[in-house]
Amino acid sequence: MGNKKLRVMLYLTILSVISFLLMYIMEVPILSLIGMPGFEFLKYDLSEVIAIVAGFIFGPVAGMIVIGLKSILFFFSGKNTTGWVGLAASLTAGVSLVFGTTLLYRIKKSNLNLILGVVVGSILLTILMVLFNYLIFLPLYGIEANAFLISGLTIFNLLKGILSGILSVVLYKILKKRVETFLNK
């Protein structure tokens, strides 16, 4: 039993580092790419994909651990330009997406729950980030929320949730058997 726990801890550590590296080397202003200027500060990265896969494999708490470790590593990496407010926003976004996306699958492992989880996670992410940005994060940055900004946040978080969710399901399907073999050795 101790050997399996050690393997899970090792796997979560590796996934956290991979998640951090994806965030560190690739941040894309996704709204600018789809023709919405003015939102260059909203950057998409693939780090949540790894955390969601961890959540599918080990459960929502494991995915949230990956989010926490990734966010802390990024905060101290020297690349973080948003300070502790950005760390809090990253944690809020990541935890809500991972929890929402992986909980249904943890309750009952089915393809339907994988898809429903992506929908639930994307909606939860969007609602929480719009609320938290409006009430907490934007005021802490000294930015006044307006309809333009809120619409951009809404679109960004929906895109982020759906894209991360779809990529997570695909990656999970590819890795599932390999991970099970690794853990059961």
Image (cartoon, rainbow, N blue to C red):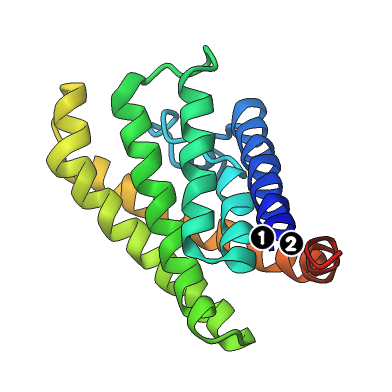
Q: Is mark 2 on a helix, strand or loop?
A: helix
Q: In this view, does 102 lie to the left or right of 154?
A: right
Q: Which residue is drawn at 84% across and 60% down?
A: 182
Q: What element carries label 1?
A: helix
Answer left or right for 130 relative to 23: left
| Residue in the image at 42% along x and 63% along y | 99
Q: Which residue lies furthest to the front in this view?
A: 2
| x 63%, y 85%: residue | 111
Along the viewing direction, whichever of 122 and 159 lies nearer the viewer:
122
- Which residue type carries mark 2? Leu
User: Relative to 83, is 117 above or below?
Assistant: below
Residue nearest the viewer, comparing 109 with 86 = 109
Which residue has dot 2 on it?
A: 171
Residue 174: image location, x then y, percent = 81, 66
Q: In which quarter of the image is residue 103?
A: bottom left
- Say what amino acid the circle numbered 1 marks: Leu
Query: Which labelled disc corresponds to residue 167?
Result: 1
Q: In this view, does 24 lie above or below 118?
A: above
In terms of image quadrants, where is residue 164? bottom right
Q: Disc number at residue 8?
A: none
Viewer-nearest residue: 72 or 43: 72
- Residue 2 shows in the view: yes
Quadrant housing the C terminus: bottom right
* Distance between the alpha carbons at the discs numbered 2 and 1: 6 Å
Relative horizontal placement of residue 117, taking residue 164 as reference (left or right): left
